[in-house]
Image (cartoon, rainbow, N blue to C red):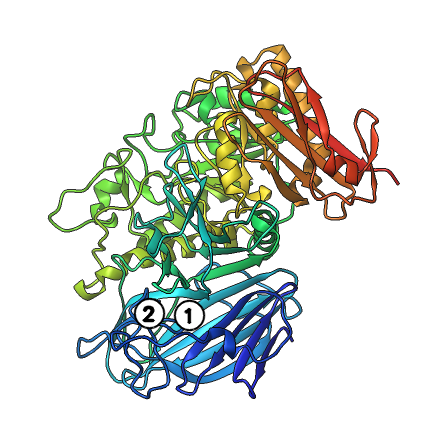
């Protein structure tokens, strides 16, 4: 098995195809981390975790076996001598928060246990092996179960924690992270994805200073501003060479990813629920299970790390029937019409688009309740028949009569104060009694921790999906949470509301998919404001950003690709001048950038010129031609968007096909650029579409020579196929 225990060393060895993760039980019963990195043979690794002793200001444990403040603790706790960032803090019934867990038992088995009520990676007994370790606090009787699952095909380890109250008194969790990882002293950088609305997931890399560096959200959602992902890389690591450790959190709410470099230079990385505004009360016998965190190690730089995440999340997080199915090529009416449409306008867009080869029309915001702007109607999920005459069933039938599929926009989690629902149930939104509520986009947030709210939303959506033939939902979330309190929770449980909200969201998504198993759902949050791994469990594709400008999308999609597979990245061709930037870019460039995603259109096709319509036909033909290599091939980021250019390529798994895309952002006189492929088989012969045949080694080491013919915002593609 890929997980082994050696009693001689009291050590656990977790092996993936190319990595090893090792820790041991010391004489005091503490779990001490030894090693994480390139695969090594099984031997006594306890020497590697030895650390120098410190003064009395770093106390030794009561039994004299350990100095928690300097030891590489496998799962750090608060209050008993480890002053660094702690993964666990429990406040017991007498009011103190001193925690001390020691090894009790373990078991190793094939397969991966289900995480009930929360999204997580999955795997068969042939694909995965799991280690469970139980550690106990002898004073509080808290039982802490550490779960580690290794994947046989990927260099990834999934981790989570369960805390059980085995005492006769209540206790309160104040922080409980999903993973704690120790790395030795080194020249470490931290990489993360930052942004805001319209500028999501921009890549940033900085040297890690001593002290705590925190990448977090306390918005009630993973958010536009930071993504639940960090990478710790050696200072010399590049895109394709060097050590890269990736940490990704499968959660859609408040998260925290912290690094701490202590005075000796060792690094601790903890990933989990943000302890700010979090608490969870456990009565005797109750348990709390954290979301799952995934760690990835690659010796092939950031690119190698990304490709592991891509395959794992596409194959073992996204679910059937859509995880590897070809997605319908769609057109969305939002930027084409905004709220100004009726059923004839929508039908005409569908008719024109269908004639060009588009396969689905998605009707966006404005079809329900009194919704003619963004100040009313949310919560009233019934068809506005003044705009959609004859109802949704008739419109759906007309669009299907064109040979197209039909999709619909919802924003289930929100409520406008101008709505029938708010008039009937003002207590259904999150609110603090007596405190005025903040508005965001003229709306409040429904309390999804409440079962009655979940039932109402399910019934409304289920009825519409049953009444009309709808194959697709775009699920939006257009503000973050304020006044986070629930009318149904007691005062001692109000700190649970953020997590209970997320669990309610997951429950609603799961229930809807159980009732409509073939439904394709696309996530959205003002674009990519909740683009996280947990959402991919329900939404195999996510609207990457409301910014549809092709040049802006280079940064956004580059950063997103650090963790997320191309199949998850929704990217559309939009009109020019662009609605967000007013930039004018060629139709070809807009198409080439959108091809690096699920692909579709965000415009009114009835207003397009004949020339642009012919371009759409050509783009759709390319979408089908290149679909497999883009969506199932390995991604190599060749040139990051640097203000002047950007390039990437996809290579099929069997290395028989490749597609390179280059975008010129800012041109210069006498333009000349050599761009090199990566990932080919150097010994195979490859032919481009112009008939040039060269060995893979030439395409990779010499590359292609593009001279002149480029202007600002232009692009080109080079497609290679193996010569048998």
Tell me the residue at 48%/37% (across/down).
544
The quadrant of the image that shows the C terminus is: top right
Disc 1 marks which residue? 161
Q: Is residue 723 above or below residue 137?
A: above
Residues at circles 1 and 2 in contact by the CB criterion of under 8 Å? yes
Q: How many marks?
A: 2
Q: Which residue is mark 2?
A: 88
| Numbered label attached to residue 75 | none
- Would residue 77 appear left or right of 241 to someone viewing this image? left
* 50 on left or right of 64: right
Residue 106 seen in this snapshot: yes
Residue 73's place in the image compared with 420, above or below, is: below
Q: CA distance from mark 1 to mark 2?
A: 10 Å
Q: Nearer the viewer, mark 1 or mark 2?
A: 2
The residue drawn where x is 64% and y is 65% is 152
Crowding at dot 1, Cα within 10 Å, few <14 / some 14-19 / many 20+, comes out as many
Residue 80 appears in which quarter of the rendering? bottom left
- Could you say where residue 370 lies in the image, as x and y percent from the top left? 32, 30
In the picture, the quarter occupied by the N terminus is bottom right
Q: Nearer the viewer, residue 463 or 637?
A: 637
| Residue 674 shown left or right of residue 714 in the figure | right
Q: In this orientation, does residue 355 appear?
A: no
- Asked whether, in this view, residue 570 is left or right of residue 220, the answer is right
Residue furthest to the right: 724
Q: Secondary structure at mark 1?
A: strand
Within the image, what quadrant is residue 144 found in?
bottom left
Q: Earlier in the sequence, mark 1 or mark 2?
A: 2
Q: Is residue 72 above or below residue 439?
A: below
Q: Position of residue 505 (x, y in %)?
A: 39, 53
Residue 197 at x, y percent in the picture: 37, 34
Give the residue furthest to the left.
434
Give x and y (percent) for residue 14. Answer: 57, 72
């Amino acid at each position: 098995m890929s997980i082994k225990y050696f009693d001689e060393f009291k050590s656990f060895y977790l092996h993936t195809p190319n990595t090893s993760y090792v820790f041991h039980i010391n004489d005091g019963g503490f779990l001490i981390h030894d090693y994480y990195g390139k695969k090594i043979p099984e031997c006594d690794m306890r020497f590697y975790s030895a650390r120098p002793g410190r003064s009395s200001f770093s106390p030794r444990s009561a039994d004299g076996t350990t100095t928690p403040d300097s030891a590489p603790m496998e799962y750090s706790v608060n209050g008993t001598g480890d002053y660094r960032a702690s993964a666990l803090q429990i406040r017991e019934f007498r009011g103190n928060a001193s925690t001390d867990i020691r090894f009790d038992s373990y078991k190793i088995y094939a397969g991966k246990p289900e995480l009930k009520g929360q999204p997580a990676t999955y795997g068969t007994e042939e694909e995965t092996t799991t280690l469970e370790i139980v550690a106990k606090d002898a004073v509080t009787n808290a039982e802490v179960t550490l779960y580690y699952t290794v994947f046989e095909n990927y260099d990834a380890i999934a981790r989570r924690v369960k805390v059980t109250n085995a005492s006769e008194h209540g206790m309160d969790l104040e922080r409980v992270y999903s993973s704690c990882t120790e790395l030795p002293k080194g020249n470490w950088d931290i990489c993360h994805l930052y942004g805001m609305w319209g500028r999501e997931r921009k890549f940033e890399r900085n040297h890690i200073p001593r002290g705590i560096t925190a990448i977090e959200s306390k918005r009630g959602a993973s958010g536009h501003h930071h993504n639940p992902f960090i990478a710790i890389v050696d200072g010399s690591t590049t895109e394709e060479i060097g050590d890269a450790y990736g940490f990704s959190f499968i959660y859609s709410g408040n998260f925290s990813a912290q690094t701490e470099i202590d005075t000796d230079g060792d690094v601790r990385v903890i990933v989990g629920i943000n302890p700010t505004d979090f608490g969870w009360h456990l009565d005797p016998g109750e348990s709390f299970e954290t979301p799952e965190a995934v760690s990835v190690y690659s010796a092939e730089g950031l690119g190698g790390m990304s490709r592991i995440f891509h395959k794992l999340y596409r194959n073992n997080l996204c679910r059937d029937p859509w995880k590897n199915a070809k997605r319908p090529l769609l057109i969305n009416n939002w930027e084409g019409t905004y709220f100004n449409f009726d059923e004839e306008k929508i039908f005409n867009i569908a008719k024109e688009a269908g004639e060009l080869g588009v396969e689905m029309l998605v009707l966006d915001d404005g079809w329900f309740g009194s919704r003619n702007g963004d100040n009313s109607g949310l919560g009233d999920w019934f068809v506005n028949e003044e705009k959609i005459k004859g109802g949704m069933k008739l419109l759906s039938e007309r669009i299907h009569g064109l040979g197209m599929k039909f999709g619909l926009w919802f924003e289930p989690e929100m409520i406008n104060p101008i709505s029938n629902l708010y008039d009937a149930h003002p207590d259904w939104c999150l609110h603090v009694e007596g405190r005025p509520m903040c508005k965001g986009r003229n709306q409040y947030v429904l309390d999804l921790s409440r079962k009655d709210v979940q039932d109402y939303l399910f019934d409304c959506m289920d009825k519409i999906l049953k009444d009309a033939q709808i194959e697709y939902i775009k699920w939006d979330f257009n503000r973050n949470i304020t006044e986070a309190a629930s009318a149904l929770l007691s005062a001692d449980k109000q700190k649970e509301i953020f997590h209970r909200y997320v669990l309610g969201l997951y429950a609603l998504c799961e229930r809807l998919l159980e009732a409509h198993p073939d439904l394709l759902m696309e996530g959205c949050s003002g674009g990519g404001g909740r683009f996280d791994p947990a959402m991919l469990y329900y939404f195999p594709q996510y609207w990457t950003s409301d910014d549809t400008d092709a040049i802006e999308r280079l940064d956004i999609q580059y950063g997103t690709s650090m963790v997320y597979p191309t199949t998850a990245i929704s990217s559309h061709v939009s009109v020019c001048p662009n609605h967000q930037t007013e930039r004018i870019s060629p139709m070809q460039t807009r198409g080439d950038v959108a091809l690096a995603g699920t692909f579709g259109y965000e415009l009114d096709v009835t207003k397009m010129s004949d020339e642009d319509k012919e371009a759409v036909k050509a783009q759709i033909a390319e979408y089908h031609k290149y679909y497999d290599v883009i969506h199932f091939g390995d991604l190599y980021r060749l040139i990051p968007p640097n203000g002047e250019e950007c390039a990437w390529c996809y290579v099929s798994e069997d290395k028989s096909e490749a597609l390179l895309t280059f975008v010129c952002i800012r041109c210069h006189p006498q333009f000349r650029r050599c761009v090199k492929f990566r990932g080919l088989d150097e010994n195979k012969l490859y032919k481009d579409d112009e008939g040039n045949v060269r060995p893979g080694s030439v395409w990779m080491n010499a590359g292609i020579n593009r001279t002149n013919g480029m202007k600002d915002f232009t692009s080109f593609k080079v497609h290679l196929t193996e010569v048998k």
